[in-house]
Image (cartoon, rainbow, N blue to C red):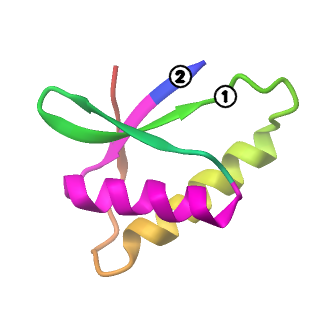
């Protein structure tokens, strides 16, 4: 399925940068989209071989990337 989400303290540019960095690393392919005027992260998990560990690793790497230069904050889920 597709899930969209945003880090509360992150800017639109932070989300774009994080998606680009994670995708360029080859670990996961994230993209961004605009919801309610805000750029948010978009993750599509249609590969049947995607595991819970893959998703956890993606979120861990994403949190690290977004935390660089920002205070830690929780993710908020989009619709």
Q: Against 5, is 79 above or below?
A: above
Q: Identify the residue at image location x=71%, y=57%.
A: 27
Local secondary structure at mark 1: loop
Q: Against 46, is 27 above or below?
A: below
Give me the disc on residue 2: 2
Report the side of 75 relative to 31 (left or right). Answer: left
Marks 2 & 1, CB-CB < 8 Å contact? yes
Q: Identify the residue at image location x=53%, y=22%.
A: 2
Give me the disc on residue 45: 1
Q: Against 72, is 41 above or below?
A: above
State the quadrant of the C terminus. Answer: top left
**Mark 2 neighbour density, 10 Å: few (under 14) some (14–19) many (20 or more):** few
State the quadrant of the N terminus. Answer: top right
In the depicted view, which residue is nearer to us: 49 or 21?
21
Q: Identify the residue at image location x=49%, y=27%.
A: 3
Residue 26 among those drawn in magenta: yes
Residue 1 among those drawn in magenta: no
From which residue to which does the magenta span run?
4-27
Res 73 visible: yes
Report the side of 27 relative to 20 (left or right). Answer: right
In the depicted view, which residue is nearer to us: 46 or 63?
46
């Amino acid at each position: 399925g597709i899930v969209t989400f945003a880090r509360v303290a992150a800017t639109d540019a932070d989300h774009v940068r994080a998606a680009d960095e994670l995708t360029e690393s080859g670990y996961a392919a994230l993209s961004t989209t605009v919801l309610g005027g805000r750029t948010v992260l978009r993750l599509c998990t249609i590969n049947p071989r995607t595991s819970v560990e893959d998703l956890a690793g993606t979120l861990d790497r994403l949190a690290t990337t977004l935390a660089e230069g920002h205070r830690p904050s929780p993710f908020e889920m989009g619709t």
